[in-house]
Image (spheres, rainbow, N blue to C red):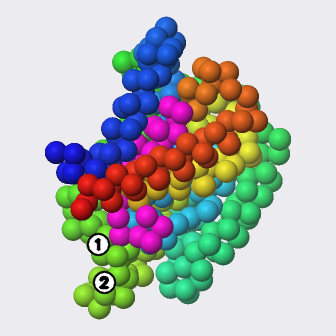
Amino acid sequence: MLKKLFENRLYSFAVILVIIVAMASMVYPAIFPTFDNFSQILLNLSTDTIVAVGMMMLLISGTFDLSVGSTVAFTGCFTSYLMFFGHVPVPIAIAAGLACALLIGFINGYLIAYQKINAMIQTLAMMGIVRGAALMVSGSGIQGLPYWFNAIGQSRLLGLQMPVWYMLITVALFTVLFSRTVIFRRYYYIGGNEKAAELSGIRVKRMKMLSFVLSSFLAGVAGILLTSRMGAALPTMGRGLELKVITAVILGGASLSGGTGKMPGALLGALFMGVIGNIMVISRVSGYWQDIILGLILIAILWLDKSLQKKYAL
């Protein structure tokens, strides 16, 4: 039983997360295990998880995108600019913002897949370009957005704000796609051995470009939701998000070498980071120490996970 459990990082990591939640519930019984607290944790990680789903897809295929955080900011800022200064109707402004996100992903995907530009260099350059564009269109920020736009991220269903439901739908949709459809399962072959996948007839270049387009689109969706939830667009949105979601998906079972990972792992990794952050806030840990403590905990968890897998794989 234990061997089967720890052979799969997704299951073993879920057990570790349950233990942490149980311990926090015993230490802070009046604060931590409440609906309001858990709903706030889910809300805080909702947009991160949507971006993490796209990053999981990229890591499965053996690559990554460092421009997703900037895409989050630009999509939200550009959409807000159209609505506030251009008086463009909400649906058209959202469509235009998502179209820009798709274009960013297309450019990244084309240059990386077809022109063989290094993914780190290309997406790092795009990160700077898109962040600068976000600053150009929004300045110090845009407020006073239309009511119906703000309602997208601020309305509630069954006590949870809508970004949480959008997150769950996104994870569920891509879980089905990667577990039930032939097209998306090809990403595992591409990440495992790109050359062999190409020789077997898989259109690797087209598939890799599609992964960047979809990942950028999800970042655009996250940017719309985050802007709507805050009721304002800021050019600093999503700063550092790319490394955060890469960490989350690796915790959730992905590998930088590609070929492994499951979509629920994106949610699990983001949930772990959200829970740890929430516990530190409740414990009144200084903000100066939170990143240090989180980093040490992540290293310890990954070490423990690897140790358990090796032990029970024998």
**Label 2 crowding class (10 Å Cα cut-off): few <14, some 14-19, many 20+?**
some
Viewport quadrant of the C terminus? bottom left
- Left or right side of 79 for 46: left
Disc assigned to residue 308:
none
Q: In this view, does 199 lie above or below 124?
A: below
Which is the main secondary structure of the residues drawn in magenta?
helix
* Residue lying at 36% horizontally and 31% vertically, measured from the top left: 18
- Residue 119, percent across and down? 58, 75
Residue 150 shows in the view: no
Q: Which residue is nearer to you in this view: 95 or 203? A: 203
**C-beta proximity under 8 Å, tags 2 and 1:** yes
The residue at the point 35 percent across, 81 percent down is 193
Give x and y (percent) for residue 113: 49, 81
Whether residue 188 can be seen here: yes
User: Residue 199, percent across and down?
Assistant: 29, 91
Question: In the visual, does 189 lie left or right of 73?
Answer: left
Residue type at mark 2?
Answer: Ala
Q: What element carries label 1?
A: helix
Question: Which residue position holds label 1?
Answer: 186
Residue 68: say if magenta.
Answer: no
Q: Which mark is residue 197?
A: 2
Please state the extent of the stretch shown in magenta in the rendering: 255-276
The residue at 52%/39% (across/down) is 273
